[in-house]
Amino acid sequence: MTPLIAVLTGHHPADRASVHRTYLDAVWLAGGQPVVLSPPPPGALDSALDVLERCDAVLITGGGDVEPERYGEAERATLMNVDEGRDTFELAAVDRSIASDRPLLGICRGLQVLAVALGGRLHQDVPTAGYASHWHEDRAYSPVHGVRVLPGSLAERALGDRRTVNSIHHQAVADTGPHLIPTAWSDDGVIEAAESADGHALLGVQWHPERLACPPEAADGDPAHLGAFHWLMQAARGERALAAASLQGHHAALGEVVHGGRSADRHANGHANGDGNGSRVAAAVRVTAGVRVTEPHDHPGTAAPVSGRG
């Protein structure tokens, strides 16, 4: 069976639906068939979600910034390519996919969308939050920094034996929220991957494995970086036991991270100048039957500096 993979794209420029071809190449090379879905016009959301339901898994690609109001914050710096229609579609797609047990892979902005959809929040601008710049578009097809990964995680499976990745983002996940576990971090502590705390087939990565695996010159590609796509195809085929096998021996360790037993790991050991050391999201999100229910509560932490792009 060739899995049908819904590839969610953006509008850039505004009058075009656009997706970097490396996402599509990576899906093909991993054994899937991409089905490109752009944000629907007003009134067509339900139709777009119906098409998504006919696919076996969902890939959320990179792109512009998520509107900060989606995670309970005001805009505090210059944002990039905010697309209200795309935010609406992709947040609804996450809810629908989880409700229907459909596997999800988020890349760059895609990881950030997963976090926002599941009760997390973002650093609207990585340098403003006190980290070095993670924007290295001039080296988009080359590894530029190291990553630390939680043993036994899906992030480790995605990386294989690789421990360096590329980096083209100015926003990042500040808090994964109650439904995700951070499982990889950059050398300076930025969250680089997260996966489900609730047993769903879900993985988000901040780097771009599709560009490392499928550069313009095919001979320069590193097929080891197709790991996340191979996992997605396996989950899409219904081989959930195999797709989750790498996590089984580490359930206790992952649970400890989720429940705060190792809060330093949960928030990448914090950051000397940031707020990733335990501040909680401003809303807990309950996902049920495809309905997104926001439950406000107090936010005891200091608000993160803001600005963004996926």
Image: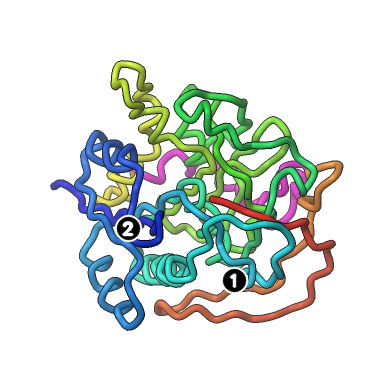
x then y, percent, for residue 203: 46, 49
> Which quadrant of the figure has residue 223?
top left
> Which quadrant of the figure has residue 177?
bottom right
Q: Is residue 249 above or below residue 289?
A: above
Q: Is residue 188 above or below residue 84?
A: above
* Amino acid at circle 2: Arg
The segment highlighted magenta reads 243-269
Instruction: Report the magenta stretch's main SS.
Output: helix
Element type at mark 2: loop
> Does residue 250 appear left or right of residue 284 in this picture?
left
Q: Give the class, few, some or many, for how many residues have Cα within 10 Å of label 1's Cα (few <14, many ≥20).
A: some
Residue annotated with mark 2: 16
Residue in the picture at 56% in, 44% down: 193
Residue 260 highlighted magenta (yes or no): yes
> Which quadrant of the figure has residue 269?
top right
* Amino acid at circle 1: Arg
x then y, percent, for residue 240: 33, 50
Residue in the picture at 52% in, 36% down: 152
Element type at mark 1: helix
